[in-house]
Image (cartoon, rainbow, N blue to C red):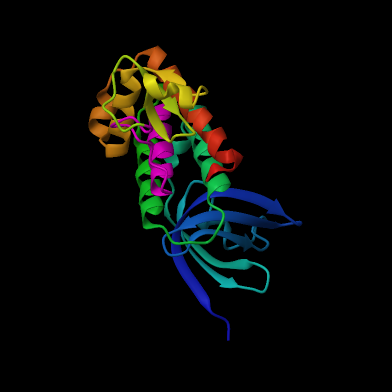
Amino acid sequence: MTTYYRTKGFVFKKEDRSEADKIFSIFTEDFGKLEIRARAIRKITSKLRGGIDRFCLSEVEFIQGKNHKTLTDAVVVERFNGMAQSVEKLIISNKIADVLDNFIKGQQRDEGIFNLLNDVFQKLNDCAPHPKPYTLIYNYFFWNFFSELGYMPEIHKCAKCHEKLNPYSLYFSNMTGGVICKKCFGADNKAQKINSDIVKILRLILKKDWQILNRLRVEPLSQNLLKQISDNYYLYMLSGHV
């Protein structure tokens, strides 16, 4: 007897397969990350076409076959049309999709990540067309995502010696997993010099204090520093440290 499974999920990736199929990568509420094959969905006559697409929240029904899951029904719950308003929003959406694709390998339910995606998709959809909130939303997602995976950076005291941080001598260490002091810099000479603004921003991000974070004036230097430490941390984790 065939068993049908039904769940809601955020569609973050799609790939063409064979002549008319697609594979959708979906982070679901009940099963975590799933890859589901939609047969003949690229045909104009397909009844599934309107119910699922990239960067939508959809309710999907599927069956588990011997080698893969097959989509049997899909209904859009929320389309997030605002995410297609600008190229910049699509770039951020793609970056979020890459993080999910690279760091979530197995099928495991995770309520924290599901709620984070709902939060981030809503913020990106609703925010006014301006580059500043886009990059903030990405960093908000990025650091909270790794925290949900169990890699929350230490930002309240030195990650190495656990002493109080000096706001004038701060470094971010991927290896140690957070901010370190000048005294501990010798333990990781690849650590990047940062300023106290970065620590302030990361604390607001990890508190999920979006109201204050969105009103915060961030100087260009600090914006560049935050991008650098996020990009470096991404590469560090991608190289096998997760």
Q: Is residue 130 visible?
A: no
Q: Quadrant of residue 217?
A: top left
Q: Is residue 97 magenta?
A: no
Across and down, in percent, residue 132 comes to: 39, 23
Across and down, in percent, residue 123 comes to: 35, 38
Residue at figure coordinates x 35%, y 28% from the top left: 128
Q: In this picture, is 63 found above or below 30?
A: below
Give the side of residue 2 with respect to residue 80, left or right.
Answer: right
Across and down, in percent, residue 53 comes to: 54, 51
Q: Quadrant of residue 105?
A: bottom right
Give the side of residue 69 with respect to residue 136, left or right.
Answer: right
Across and down, in percent, residue 56 comes to: 47, 49
Location of the N terminus by quadrant is: bottom right
Residue located farthest toward the right when viewing the structure as drawn: 19
Q: Nearer the viewer, residue 190 or 91?
A: 190
Q: Nearer the viewer, residue 192 or 135?
A: 192
Q: Is residue 202 visible?
A: yes
Q: Nearer the viewer, residue 5 or 151?
A: 151
Residue at figure coordinates x 62%, y 61% from the top left: 38
Q: Is residue 156 magenta?
A: yes
Q: In this picture, is 100 found above or below 157?
A: below
Q: Nearer the viewer, residue 170 or 7?
A: 170
Residue at figure coordinates x 55%, y 35% from the top left: 236
Segment colored magenta: 133-160
Q: In this picture, is 89 found above or below 104?
A: above
Number of labelled discs? 0
